[in-house]
């Protein structure tokens, strides 16, 4: 950033300051805007080289104005506010003229010419500069305090964006640039090329490397990276997935599974998209069963190399994103050293040469057209005795010494395998965030449409808005509440991942698996419901549901099939259950049984089962008990059932098969309990009393709607009676009715710009 003393700013430079201040006020100038501004600056006649260099520097997106520069601009603006009445100034151009006059007037040797005034006027119009509102905020007029509306959507957006608001707003502005304009492309090759172009533009702005260490061009901030992925999913899911494959899966594998030598060679180029890579894990024959992959990586001592081979057609890497564009792959294979298998490891394998042609021994096939995500170049990859250097092994958790021996600090292969996979959990969290974004876009569109579409009504009167029908409210508003609840849980989860340590990694992995399944199932259900809520209009491509449905559907499968993930969650809970008894012994069993006795006392109490007053039904304590009881009861029943099977000498595999459905029920109960608990914690952290009161209603709707959705279980286990479930249903309907006047602001609170919603029925 070019530095110059504030007092030395020429009149022509000062004339640009108000415009640049407003242009940068949202944190980001888009590439098109930068090009427009720089073109006008370059065309200014008789401008000094020093002034031109400074102004061009101030519009450089790679080095946008730092805090000190903004402070200097602010100081100048405050100085002129002392003897200038902003109310008499109508435009940015006029304000620039005032500043130019104060900087030396027409006698100054570098005074602005008439052409400069014309350039400023043109830029003001072209960039749609919003008047002087931002400047008046610098020096506001004295008067009575003006309170914002109780349900200002910006407050809800701020609550969700948190510390990521700056980077989210910068990205939204970039995606609104004409360079990112969405238009229908049905030919997959052209769509893939466009997505690749978008990807490189994002990388040039530094978004891809956010999660990498600073020495490799990043910010070492996985939380920001996840926020970027979430925001991209509002815009185009193919771009979000391509972004995740390049920077999260490929770059993440180099970062998390490699060591410094790999970081130095590959990480900076991965983050800048100069080196395109893919993540070659899944195989046609094994799907989710990563531990039993067939691809081999056999160490060859005489050449100090690894031989990568696909022993069968079914061993081909399947559904690999970036397969058609990549130059290199992180290939997961059974590592064989001195004739002994050391389990699955990742090896970097070049795929294409500098001219883009496939290297010998590699076979790549296009997966072709898919149900959705046709902007992502998924393909299949096979290897025929491909030789790579030993050092291409990503060896953070296991290495081959120069002497040809395998070494690892983790002796047990199974633990080494799960430790390796645990470092890649961020992908699951991002998939969940992306799915939730798709659900939010759908809810936004369906809600806005319901607030203008009229259907039926009293005789001889205007037809009624469909949002005013209780049935329509019940379709949409509880799902809006669930979207907020899931958002808060995912934000907490990505923080847990970012700050994980040895003691918490198992919990993070379990939660990531469960919340990913929960969020993606929710998205699939919500998008379909919203499509139906928009009738025939929802079937038109222009209103986005076609792509939202098709593109997000696969989210229930990749980064772990949801059913498999839920079984993984249950296994983790059963392990914790077993560990608790082992660690606590007899007293641990007594404490658990005491909880069961307490629950039984409450459930057989007729007053409790039939208690229907609003204070009780809206009470956090009732919600917590209901969610916790369901989880504990299912866990205890499942554990007891398994124990009886083991006593009968039924094999562990057969026990697992017989209890699969029971395990999924446990996992759902656990995840819903965790989401509820974190929603309560979020409420406790909100300082704005108005927002807190409003979000309390959203929380209550989420809690009661979830209980109502599981009323069959609660009735079956005698936790409530029918009179109570009926009262809960009435409370859900009442909360929907209470939130109806604010439903538009609720979806506006997602903070999705109109340019990203881009559905005619939502305007």
Image (cartoon, grey):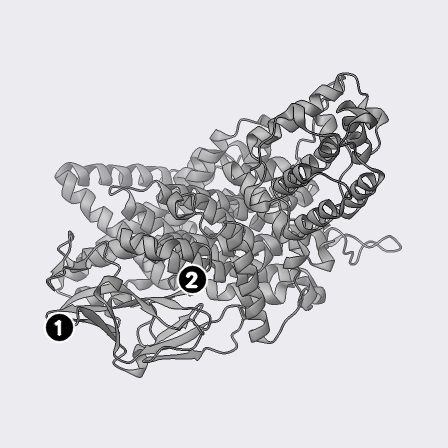
**Dots 2, 1 in contact, CB < 8 A:** no
Locate the N terminus by quadrant: top right
Q: Label 1 belongs to which residue?
A: 302
Q: Label 2 belongs to which residue?
A: 275
Q: Residue at x 21, y 67 (%)?
A: 653
Seen in the image, is 301 located left or right of residue 66? left
Residue nearer the viewer, 3 or 284: 3
Seen in the image, is 703 located left or right of residue 213? right
Q: Where 432 sits versus 307, above or below?
A: above
Residue nearer the viewer, 370 or 322: 322
Q: Where 595 sits versus 441, above or below?
A: above
Quarter-of-image position of residue 261: bottom left
Asked whether residue 480 is in view, the answer is yes
* Dot 1: element: loop
* Dot 2: element: loop
Seen in the image, is 510 located left or right of residue 410? right
Q: Residue at x 82, y 26 (%)?
A: 107
Tell me which numbered mark, 2 or 1, is placed earlier along the sequence.
2
Image position, residue 407 (x, y; %): 13, 57
Categorize mark 2 by other alpha carbons within 10 Å: few (<14), some (14-19), many (20+).
some
Q: Where 71 sits versus 723, above or below?
A: above
Q: Where 410 sits versus 214, above or below?
A: below
Give the CA distance from mark 2 to mark 1.
30 Å
Seen in the image, is 327 located left or right of residue 102? left
Image position, residue 335 (x, y; %): 20, 67
């Amino acid at each position: 950033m070019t530095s110059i003393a504030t007092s030395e700013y020429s009149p022509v430079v000062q004339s640009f300051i108000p415009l640049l201040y407003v242009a940068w006020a949202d944190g980001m100038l888009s590439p098109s805007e930068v090009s427009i501004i720089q073109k006008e600056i370059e065309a200014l006649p008789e401008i000094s080289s020093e002034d031109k260099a400074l102004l061009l520097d101030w519009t450089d997106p790679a080095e946008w104005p730092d805090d000190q520069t903004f402070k200097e601009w602010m100081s100048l603006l405050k100085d002129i506010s002392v003897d200038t009445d902003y109310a008499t100034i109508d435009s940015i151009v006029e304000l620039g003229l005032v500043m130019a006059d104060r900087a030396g007037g027409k006698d100054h040797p570098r005074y602005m010419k008439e052409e400069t005034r014309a350039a400023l006027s043109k830029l003001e119009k072209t960039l749609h500069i919003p008047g002087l509102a931002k400047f008046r905020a610098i020096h506001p007029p004295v008067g009575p305090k003006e309170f914002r509306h109780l349900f200002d959507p910006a407050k809800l957006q701020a609550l969700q964006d948190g510390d990521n608001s700056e980077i989210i707003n910068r990205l939204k502005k970039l995606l609104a640039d004409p360079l990112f304009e969405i238009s229908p492309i049905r030919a997959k090759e052209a769509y893939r090329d466009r997505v690749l172009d978008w990807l490189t533009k994002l990388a040039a702005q530094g978004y891809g490397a956010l999660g990498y260490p600073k020495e490799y061009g990043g910010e070492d901030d996985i939380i920001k990276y996840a926020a970027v992925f979430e925001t991209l999913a509002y815009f185009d899911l193919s771009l979000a997935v391509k972004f995740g494959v390049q920077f999260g899966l490929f770059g993440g594998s180099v970062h998390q599974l490699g060591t410094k030598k790999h970081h130095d060679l590959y990480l900076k180029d991965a983050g800048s998209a100069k080196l395109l890579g893919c993540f070659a894990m899944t195989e046609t024959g094994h799907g989710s069963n990563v531990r039993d992959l067939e691809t081999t990586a056999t160490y060859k001592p005489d050449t100090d190399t690894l031989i990568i081979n696909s022993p069968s057609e079914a061993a081909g890497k399947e559904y690999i994103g970036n397969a058609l564009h990549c130059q290199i792959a992180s290939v997961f294979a059974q590592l064989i050293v001195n004739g002994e298998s050391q389990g699955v490891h990742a090896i970097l394998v070049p795929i294409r040469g500098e001219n883009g042609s496939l290297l010998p021994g590699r076979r790549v096939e296009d997966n072709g057209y898919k149900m959705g995500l046709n902007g992502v170049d998924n393909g299949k990859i096979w290897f025929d005795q491909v030789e790579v250097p030993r050092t291409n092994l990503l060896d953070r958790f296991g290495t081959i010494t120069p002497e040809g021996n395998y070494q690892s600090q983790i002796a047990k292969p199974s633990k080494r395998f799960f430790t390796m996979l645990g470092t890649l959990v961020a992908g699951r969290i991002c998939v969940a965030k992306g799915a939730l974004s798709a659900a939010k876009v759908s809810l936004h569109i369906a809600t806005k449409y319901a607030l203008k579409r009229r259907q039926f009504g009293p005789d001889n009167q205007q037809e009624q808005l469909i949002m005013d029908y209780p049935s329509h409210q019940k379709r949409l508003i509880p799902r809006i509440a669930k979207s907020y609840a899931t958002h808060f849980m995912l934000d907490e989860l990505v923080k847990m991942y970012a700050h994980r340590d040895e003691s918490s990694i198992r919990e993070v992995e379990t939660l990531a698996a469960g919340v990913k399944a929960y969020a993606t199932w929710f998205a699939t259900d919500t998008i379909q419901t919203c499509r139906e809520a928009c009738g025939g209009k929802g079937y038109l491509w222009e209103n986005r549901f076609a792509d939202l449905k098709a593109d997000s559907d696969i989210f229930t499968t990749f980064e772990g099939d949801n059913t498999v993930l839920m079984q993984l969650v249950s296994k983790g809970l059963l392990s914790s259950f077993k560990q608790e008894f082992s660690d606590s012994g007899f007293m641990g069993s007594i404490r658990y049984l005491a909880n069961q006795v307490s629950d039984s006392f409450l459930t057989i109490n007729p007053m409790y089962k039939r208690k229907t007053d609003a204070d009780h039904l809206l009470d956090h304590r009732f919600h917590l008990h209901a969610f916790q009881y369901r989880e504990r009861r299912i866990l205890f029943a499942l554990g007891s059932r398994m124990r009886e099977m083991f006593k009968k000498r039924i094999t562990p595999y057969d026990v697992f098969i017989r209890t699969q459905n029971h395990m999924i029920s446990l996992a759902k109960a656990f995840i819903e309990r965790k989401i509820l608990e974190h929603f309560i914690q979020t409420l406790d952290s909100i300082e704005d009393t108005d927002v807190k009161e409003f979000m309390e209603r959203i929380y209550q709707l989420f809690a009661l709607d979830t209980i109502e959705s599981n009323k069959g279980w609660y009735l079956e286990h005698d936790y409530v009676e029918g009179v109570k479930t009926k009262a809960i249903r009435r409370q859900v309907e009442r909360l929907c009715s209470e939130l109806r006047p604010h439903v538009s602001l609720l979806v506006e609170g997602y903070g999705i710009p109109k340019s990203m919603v881009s559905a005619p029925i939502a305007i």
